[in-house]
Amino acid sequence: MKFAPKLLSALLMAQCAVTFAKGNADTIFYGGPIVTVNAKNEEVQALAVQNGKIVAVGTKDAVTKEWQVDNTKVIDLKGQTLMPGFVEPHVHVFVTTFFERLGLNLSNFELPYDTMDTLSQKLKAGLKNVPPGGWLFAFGVDPSRTSPFMAELTADDLDKVSKDVPIFVVNQSGHIAYVNHRAIELAGITDKTPAPKGGGVYVKDAQGKLTGKLIEPPSYLAFMAKMPPPTEAQLSAGINGMLNTIASTGVTTASEMSVGGNFGVDKEVAMWKEIFAKKASPIRIRGYLWGEALPVGYSSLKPNDGDDHLRFIGIKYISDGSTQGLTAALNAPYIYPKNSKWKGDLDYKDAEIYGLMKPFIDQGWQISIHSNGDKAIDQTLNNYAKALAGNPKPQDRRFRIEHFTINNEAQVKKAVKLGVVPSFTIGHVDYWGAAFNNHLIGPERSKRIDPAGDFKRAGGKFTLHSDIPVSPVGPLTYISEEVTRQWQLPPQKVLGPDQAITVDDAIRAITIDAAYQIFADNIVGSLEVGKQADFVVLEKNPRQTAPADIRNIKVKGTWIDGKPVSLK
């Protein structure tokens, strides 16, 4: 067939137009290592972005030839490293806002440890900022990181700070708090007040008198009900600051694990929707509804309601407490104090927690259960096995266990068989490893804390997280912590070398595997064609850095949907 010259020219121009449209990249990156975290763990020379998505990865010549046009923005990394944006699978944004931004932050992850005197001085200094009629609200005391070891605040201690101002101090774990007598009086709690429902305890001494120590959040409620609430402006500014802090660590997607734990589920869902309607969040959020706050028959939200920026995907329950706080449920006793027979308690009976989660499993929600101790892990795995019985593809549900701290090899194998994906608070090894090993549970159980090595060998997936405010957000720090497994307190030792993993494995645990855990691996977690252009730019390549030094690599920029995040 012959074409007239004009028709042939028109056809060629149309073909060029199609090619031009295809090759019209908004941005091309090159000039430094581009770590894809794809199935082959490849590094490439260049990456192109169009309309917020990755459209090409490969050699610089190939990517620029096919995708660069006059208006393409070309970014020379100048030796810096481009990686997938980090995925933080376990944070508490609203809780951390209250504890660290609206209250007095006493958290200390440095050395030396605080003493009872330094804590008292900090609390007294905090009194200056308490308005008339207000409470001194503080967070971050940690007896396992205090000198002397396991020294705890009492109502009498806090009375020495102030007898007139009510004082409420939350332990670093979040599972314990301390109050003075003025706070006890205002809350209307007496020596005869029964324990609150949901596992809370008002601790009493041998004479049956309140000590000022509270165990588990249900025991906090009577006190928090008397505290003046923050203003809307204070809360908004605090949440915004918290989200920006998370983004500054290179995180582009995070899971909020306690939606509804502060103001009720419906109100907090509405608050999150408003944040995203105003485009006030610099990162993507996956939300887990706080199970204890859900009324029977809850149906206001359906599984996966939302979009790729804000989506509600799971229900979260708490089965036990804190290991370093001696409230996690263990199969064998703690070794502190000497000759102790204390094993900790479960928050629910087996059938009770199963009855709570089963209706939501049937609706299609992902389930996440906080289980620190091996007794709690047994309960959770048994209930998951019951719920998944007859399911030919249990891994499709991606049920979660948060922390998986004190464990055994049989539990790892069972979790992998059930497709359960645990998320480890790897700061346990770093900040509390010495306390676990030397004082709380002994070397044999301590060496298995956060068993990434066993999960890797068994073919399972796992992730690493901060559980902020329990430990600081910092995915690069998690890599150092998991690869070296070295505890902080001198003389530094390696806790469980058999559970160490490679740098590449740790990178996957904070990118693609974390994305898998929260059903986001189709859009983020690796740098592959078709995925969202969510990146982190690093000063150095962690794959070429000594493991102990990875935590010190500087984050130079965070990008979401192909645009740099402007941190406020």
Image (cartoon, rainbow, N blue to C red):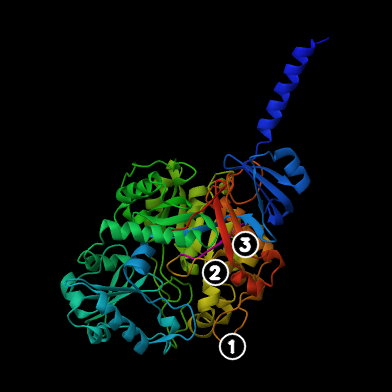
Comparing 191 with 264, the one in front is 264
Going by the image, does 204 lie left or right of 38? left
Question: Where 215 falls versus 1 (above or below)?
Answer: below
Residue 181 locus on image (x, y percent): 20, 80
Question: Where 421 falls versus 224 (above or below)?
Answer: above
Comparing 436 with 285, the one in front is 285
* Mark-to-mark CA distance, 3 and 1: 31 Å
Q: Residue furthest right?
A: 1
Q: Write down the residue under mark 2.
A: 426
Q: Write down the residue under mark 1.
A: 491
- Of mark 3 and mark 2, the one earlier in the sequence is 2
- Of mark 3 and mark 1, the one earlier in the sequence is 1
User: Neighbour class for label 1 at 10 Å: few (<14), some, many (≥20)?
Assistant: few
Tell us which disc is closer to us: 3 or 2: 3
Going by the image, does 295 lie left or right of 401? left
Quadrant position of residue 396: top right
